[in-house]
Image (cartoon, rainbow, N blue to C red):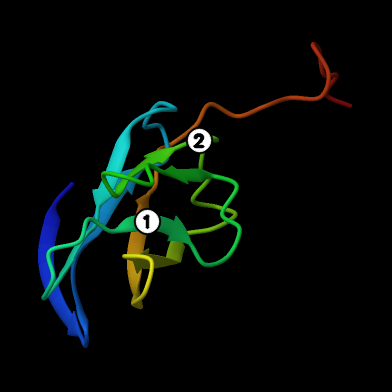
Amino acid sequence: MGNKLITVTIRPISFSVVDSVISEDDPIGTTVATVSASDESNSPPTYSFVDTYPNFVIDSSTGVIRIREQVDREKTPLFDILVKASDGQKTSTATVSLTIEDVNEMPKFDSPTYEYV
């Protein structure tokens, strides 16, 4: 798993974004990315998701994004999360891309026994 820091400058707020690779077996509460923003007045921004992302939660004051519900690579191999930073007057958005790494799960059987005919 690797993280890459990308700085995106969107006038009037400058946004730092992390693209991240996470594993589908990372536990709930794992930090998957951190965003940070600043503007010319150095007003502390608040962070929020632009849309609904039930698998993730963002801390409005730190920009830390964590797993809220388990992710499944077979269902969704990539999440593009649109994050908003606002200082109360100015607002900017940036996309955080989370790539999900596959983990080989044990097969699940519907019946406790099977008969070969």
- The residue type indicated by label 1 comes to Tyr
Q: Residue at x 21, y 88 (%)?
A: 11
Horizontal side, residue 43 vs residue 57: left or right: left
**Residue 59 at x, y = what percent?**
37, 42
Q: Residue at x 47, y 43 (%)?
A: 57
Q: Is residue 93 above or below residue 102?
A: below
Q: Which residue is mark 1?
A: 47
Residue closer to the observer: 27 or 47:
47
Q: Residue at x 34, y 77 (%)?
A: 90
Proximity of marks 2 and 1: CB atoms separated by less than 8 Å: no
Q: Is residue 2 above or below residue 79?
A: above
Indicate the secondary structure of the residue bearing disc 2: loop
Quarter of the image where one finds residue 67: top left
Q: Residue at x 26, y 44 (%)?
A: 62
Mark before the other along the chain sequence, 2 or 1: 1
Residue closer to the observer: 104 or 22:
22
Mark 2 or 1, closer to the camera: 1
- Circle 2 packing at 10 Å, graded few (<14), some (14-19), many (20+), is some
Horizontal side, residue 61 vs residue 38: left or right: right
Indicate the secondary structure of the residue bearing disc 1: strand
**Residue 4 at x, y = what percent?**
11, 61
Query: The C terminus is located in which quarter?
Result: top right
Q: Which residue is mark 2?
A: 68
Q: Give the spatial CA distance, label 2 vs label 1.
A: 16 Å
- Circle 1 packing at 10 Å, graded few (<14), some (14-19), many (20+), is many
